[in-house]
Image (spheres, rainbow, N blue to C red):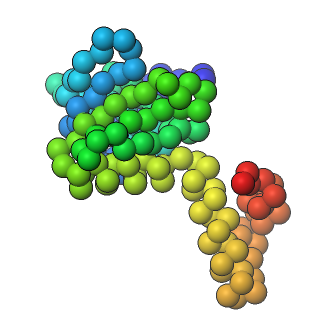
Amino acid sequence: MRYNEKELQALSRQPAELAAELGMRAPKKGSVVKRRLVKLVVNFLFYFRTDEAEPVGALLLEHCRVTQEEPTSFSISFVEDPERKYHFECCSEEQCQQWMGALRGASYEFMRRSLIFYRNEIQKMTGKDPLEQFGISEEARFQLSGLKA
């Protein structure tokens, strides 16, 4: 994926939906758990060294799977390479559940499916398409036919 490094750094400075110091182990062989400041901003998961302002890296949370590994840890893997996992260790089970929920809801596809679901529910209740007033009701990205089962 191509990206503009300055724009990504600017995005990493935006207010986070969720942020905490977590243990993190990269998918590289021999990788050890390191404390990282982890920030969820829109659909990017940024991770920082705890003493630095610029991110060490970022994960685009599209086509990924968030899996609970232990009561206080979870992993993120991607459809293209499911064996390559990023592992995260939380301080508590509650924090782990909070992170997993936030990460699962951060993808564009999840938000799109939610929009379509609520659009249809509002349409059933009111008889009106709530997107019509914005002139976007016919766009393909908002149609059920675009959803995969």
Quadrant that contains the N terminus = top right
Question: Would residue 13 appear left or right of 146 to someone viewing this image?
Answer: left
Give above or below for 79 relative to 14: above
The answer to whether residue 90 is visible is: yes
Q: Position of residue 37 (x, y in %)?
A: 24, 34
Question: Would residue 13 appear left or right of 32 to someone viewing this image?
Answer: right
Q: Residue furthest bottom?
A: 126
Quadrant that contains the C terminus = bottom right
Q: Position of residue 110 (x, y in %)?
A: 57, 53
Q: Residue furthest front?
A: 70
- Judging depth in this view, the residue of 110 and 55 nearest the camera is 110
Circle count: 0
Q: Residue furthest top?
A: 30
Q: Residue at x 63, y 56 (%)?
A: 112
Q: Residue at x 40, y 54 (%)?
A: 101
Give above or below for 132 relative to 51: below
Quarter residue 33 falls in: top left
- Judging depth in this view, the residue of 24 and 69 nearest the camera is 69
Q: Residue at x 73, y 51 (%)?
A: 148
Q: Residue at x 71, y 84 (%)?
A: 124
Q: Position of residue 14 (x, y in %)?
A: 37, 42
